[in-house]
Image: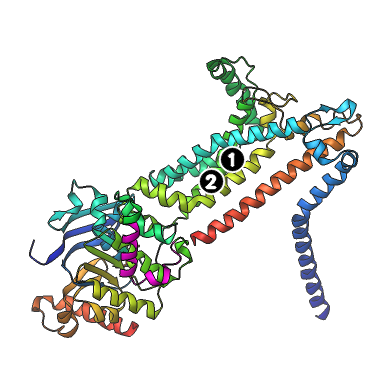
Amino acid sequence: MARFRIGRHLRSRIHLVWMVVSLMIILLLPFILGIGLYVKSILLLEEKSLWELLFSSDWRPLSGNFGFLSFAISSLWVTALSLLIAGPICLLTAIHLTHYAKKWVLQIMHPVIDILAGIPSVIFGVWGILVIVPFISRYVAPIFGIETSGYTILTGSIVLAVMIIPFILNIMIDVFKMIPDELKEASLSLGASKWQTIKLVVIRKAFPGIISAFGLGISRAFGETIAVLMVVGNVAKIPTGVFQAGYPLPALIANNYGEMLSIPMYDSALMLAALILFCVVLIFNFLSRILIMRSEKITN
Amino acid sequence: MEKGVKILVRDLNLHFGKNHVLKNVNVTIPEKKITVILGPSGCGKTTLMKTMNRLTDIYPDVKVSGNIFINDEDILNTQQDITILRQKMGLLSQRPYPLPMNIYNNVAYGLRISGRRKKRYLDKRIEHYLTMANLWDEVKDRLKESASRLSIGQQQRLCLARGLAVDPEIILADEPTSALDPISSQAIEEKFVELKKNYTIVLVTHILRQAKRIADHVVFMYLGEVIEQGPADQIFNHPRKRSQNRILKDCSISILHFAFCILQ
Ligand SMILES: Nc1ncnc2c1ncn2[C@@H]1O[C@H](COP(=O)(O)OP(=O)(O)O)[C@@H](O)[C@H]1O
Ligand SMILES: [Mg+2]
């Protein structure tokens, strides 16, 4: 009897230990990743300062020059432009769904959004090549008198925008749903029209939430790799317009890792690119989480 | 419409989807008096009040039929601009919901919406209405602060000032003291008694004692129906003086009375 009890005690202790270990692994995972990347990139960092690497656009791995500037700027272009496209669409859609549409429309939209969010990124890439690339080169660019293959920053941004829309939209719908009816009623009872109420009260109340939705969108967009890589052109040069090819950081890593590692420092450089990416995404995620928490506090 | 009657509700029926929430409601609300709508939770008091303000419009699956006359205008079947109609009524809800802006702008909101934007004019009005709501002294040095920083009691008075600022004829108050401490509650009650000189006040409550303290006119609701209404004195003090064919309803009222007394 006593032995049995000890056995059971021991067993539950073991289960507990495993649970704690799993939890610790998950909690530590980001740190392990970050440290791994840092250790790998330290070789390059010892040779050149981070500043030098970040603000030089001289990318000649064979002669040991690893300037990340054109990649970083490509990343910024693609991310900012995709947000510029996706942001207003999401904002208007979320307002319509939560304030104008019938209930069943929202009920239909939820699974549609989930499906969009679940589609593998390579499919968006193929869609970009088949539809957006020719669309840009044949119809959009000629309007501005520009000749292009269609593999441009703009193409990447459009594909990326479509990919981040479900994530931003999901959060925005929740943000708008959280706003209490009584607040809108207060505004209406003071003589405001429905649109005035949305403009002056609802959006203002939802503002922190809207910003944090954008923040999460940015951190997704910044790190998205395959689909962008397939349509953005991948030319290592600082882009000066949306109809030029770009070469964002994730595409750099995905395209080159494992191929030219015989070149000295190359893998260290790619690891540093990954580390930069990792930090930017981490910071944006962190900031948007803080904003979400703050907006929840305000609305409650 | 008879003289001295401000709001007249006739055969009002309201459905939320399949839920029949207001059933053949007929209510008379006298001018410049405090009318208290009394009844247990969920009987449709809030809904009745929102219908008077056409706030039920914002819910997608609501069906309303009947008439509500305010100053002889049937607001349920009117061509008039609803926003103008709503400005005739100030609304106080169960919990204060200050607009997400500073104290000054909360009060200025309704004025600006109706086109009054001059700073000097606004400054004067805002002081006037905040004073009227007994809030001026407490906030005059922090008008630019966010309204959510105020205490709940102060917020409720701010909501009152905000409602008064659009110069309504009617004040609709839905359990305005239920989130407040006793002292703030009393302040609001006293304010209402003072305000009834110039305003018609409709007050929803489920607190019988509050009704007894300040009501001039009482409407009893139960499960979506109005089962009794009349001057407070008659309802509270002479409940037997009613016609014989109402015996059944009287029974249910007695049960209600009883339930309320126990709950208090
Ligand atoms: N927005 C709404 N949608 C659906 N049903 C509602 C809504 N608001 C109120 N109801 C229903 O109407 C009934 C009356 O509610 P309410 O008017 O809030 O009662 P009271 O204010 O007397 O507590 C309740 O049964 C409630 O479930
Ligand atoms: Mg209620």
Q: Report the amino acid beneath label 1.
A: Ala
Judge from the rendering whether residue A103 lies leftward or rightward of residue A124; answer left or right. left
SS at mark 2 in the image: helix
Q: Is any atom of residue A10 visible in this view?
A: yes
| Mark 2 lies on residue | A170
Checking the image for residue B90, the label placed there is none
**Is B137 contained in the magenta span?**
yes
Along the viewing direction, whichever of B6 and A134 lies nearer the viewer: B6
SS at mark 1 in the image: helix
Q: What residue is rendered at 67% in x and 30% in y?
A: A228
**Residue B28: x and y, percent?**
15, 66
Q: Report the amino acid beneath label 2.
A: Asn
For the N terminus of chain B, the image quarter is bottom left
Q: Chain of mark 1?
A: A
Judge from the rendering whether residue A20 lies leftward or rightward of residue B218; answer left or right. right
Q: What residue is rendered at 46% in x and 60% in y?
A: B144
Q: Is residue B233 above or below residue B229?
A: below
- Local crowd size for mark 2, using a 10 Å CA cut-off: few (<14), some (14–19), many (≥20): some
For the C terminus of chain B, the image quarter is bottom left
How far apart marks 1 and 2 lie (CA) works out to: 10 Å
Q: What segment carries the magenta color?
A: B122-143
Q: Main secondary structure of the magenta part?
A: helix
Along the viewing direction, whichever of A42 and A22 lies nearer the viewer: A42
Judge from the rendering whether residue A72 lies leftward or rightward of residue A204; answer left or right. right
Determine which quarter of the picture holds residue B209: bottom left
- Local crowd size for mark 1, using a 10 Å CA cut-off: few (<14), some (14–19), many (≥20): some
| Mark 1 lies on residue | A117
**Residue A39: x and y, percent?**
87, 46
Q: Is residue A55 above or below residue A211?
A: above
Disc 1 to disc 2: CB gap under 8 Å: yes
Tell me which numbered mark, 1 or 2, is placed earlier along the sequence.
1
